[in-house]
Image (spheres, rainbow, N blue to C red):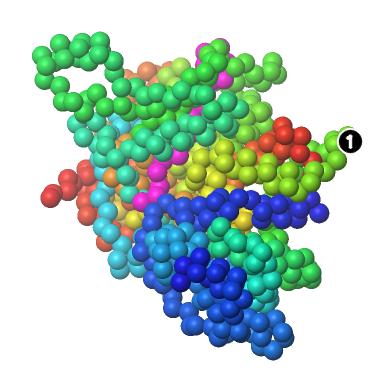
Amino acid sequence: MKNEKLLDAIGKIDDELIDDAIRNTKKKKKSGWLKWGVVAACAAFVVYAGVQSLPMGKTPTGGADGYGDLMPEGEEGPAGDQDALEGGNPVRDAGVSELPMLTVSDSMRIGTEGYYVYDISELVNANPWSEDAALQTLPVYQNPLSYGDFNVSGADFNAMKEFLLDVAERLGMDTRHLEVTDDTPDEAYRAAIYEKADGDVPEEYFNPTRVIAEENGIRIEVDTEMTATITFEPTRPLPDNYHFAYHASYEDIAAVAGYLKETYQDLIGMEHPQTNIFGGDYNIKFRQSYDIGFFEADGDVTEQIINYNFNQVEFSCDDNKELWLIRIFQPDLSNKAGDYPLISVEEATDLLLDGNYMSSSMGEMGGREKIAKVDLVYRFGGGEEYYIPYYRFYVEEEISEKSVMKQQDQDIKSYVAYYVPAVEGQYITNMPVDGDVPSVKG
Amino acid sequence: MNDNEIINLYWERNEKAITATAEKYGSYCYTISYNILHNNEDAEECVNETYFGAWKSVPPQRPNRLSTYLGKITRNLSLNCFKRYTAQKRGLGQTELVLSELEDCIPAKTSVEQAVEEMVLVQSIDQFLYAQPEQKRCIFIRRYWYLHSIREIAQAYQMSESKVASLLFRMRNALKVHFEKEGITL
């Protein structure tokens, strides 16, 4: 069997590769060594002679990788390093009572998150969450980035570069000679800024914010939030039978999605990519639009929810209906705060009606009868300290009679998003009140 | 006891070599075997056979890295044992899954090329792996040499399981492309 032959051949790779693999982990922590009893000197011989077995008889339990607490002590070993192997779950393995308190962040987003549709059913997406999933907990992650007045700190530029090179490989680019730069301003730009600000510019203002590589008309940028943006110059046309446009119909966009899924499968790099056609709301010219994304559908509902919210690959067209831009989202989720217990949709609705929500709405929140839809999403990309799941309520709001939309079509409706933390309130230090997020002191 | 001292015991035909090996690497070898076989008794037997295999081969061998030398013996013995398993037993553990995944790496067959010798195949895999970024390389080896589960790898690298699965999926495809470019046929 060819796969067996391959598995056997892999068994014979360089020793250095084998050793390095078991040494390399995300973080190295001291592990608790299990003490194995000393084995009788000739027991192995005796066993082989068919007399008796060595007194092992134990299922490996050690560590996240099965080696953590089975490693021999001493300066040598497969890694020659006592810290080499993990012991225990490297993710912060807190019981419910040890879950850290969370702070809800005021979003740095601007504008109102509202949707114009005739019926809420026109708003579509492939969100894998449903109330029927009856999830008891969901993970919360701490954002490794900190946002100052002039800069973002905590970014891992090595990881950004590695991600960029990975994306380049997936695009079929030769990465051996690919030059990766960043957006550190040149001297001329600095001088211009100093002049404008009369010299009063903090140095961190000029810190780089992204890594960049460009070759043969493909430009890849990876920013501090680990979003890779790929642009094409010239843009890439699709075959004539595909209508990839801002206001293409759902059916046309679905067809385009099928083409992109096939054509860019290496870039998408998912074993079971799930198509996410999202949007369906109308602009002020009453034109609907849909966007295309893909997320990994492998794994249980929780994994799918994480992939949907954090790890999509999205495709965008330009005015000429050609493929212009691709975004790949891969935020750093390595700092897991824990798996937090969730409230029900009904409990969240009560909180919503009590004013415990975040929203960009400028008006009063209507009553229960104005709630049209609810789903569950994570908010990220707006400077959050924690990536927390929220119930997102779509609440109908009155459209002013003076509104251009209303004047053109009385039947159009407006729905604004209201967010209620889906995590039990006991874990939140600053539950929103009356639509505002209290600041956290200290 | 350091590895050189243990190897010297083998060379001196001192049976304490076995004790020392078992004490230092018994658990390591057992874990490798258990990952493949998912059976205590068979894993123990493979580990014991490993000691005998080391005894028979050292000398004349003088391994540079005793750990991987033993690990390779254990892995080979365990995979041979696995091949004799019935269908039911084969379904336990990771081996069947790993074999299924490795189907993705098999290059397209041509009518002209013959299957390469194992040495050439191994060298090609080495070349492919050394060209990978460290983390991707190590994740690949953890999965396909050590037969770690996706979950174990995800925990070790603090990644989601689906991210590990996606990464491995892309690497398997990349290995297949590498084989095809090298003209490797299995």
Residue A91 placement (x, y as % from top left) = 40, 58
Q: Counting other residues with Cα less than 10 Å from the Cα at mark 1, is it few (<14), some (14-19), or many (20 or more)?
A: few
Could you say which quadrant of the image residue A277 lies in? Answer: top right
Q: Which element type, helix, strand or loop, lies under badge 1?
A: loop
Compared to A102, does A380 lie above or below?
A: above
**Foreground: A433 or A76?**
A76
Residue at 69% x, 71% y is: B56
Tell me, yes or no, whether the highlighted magenta stretch contains residue A323. yes
Work out whether residue A159 or residue B58 is closer to the camera in this orientation and state it: B58
- Apparent side of residue B28 relative to residue A393 in the rendered image (left or right): right
Q: Is residue B48 left or right of residue A440?
A: right
Residue placed under numbered mark 1 in the picture: B111
On screen, residue A256 versus residue A311, left or right, reads right
> Which chain letter matches label 1?
B
* x and y, in percent, of residue A26 in the image: 42, 51
Is residue A222 in view from this perspective?
A: yes
A225 sits left or right of B87 in the view: left
Q: Which region of the structure is painted magenta?
A: A316-335
Residue found 57% across the figure and 31% down from its top: A169
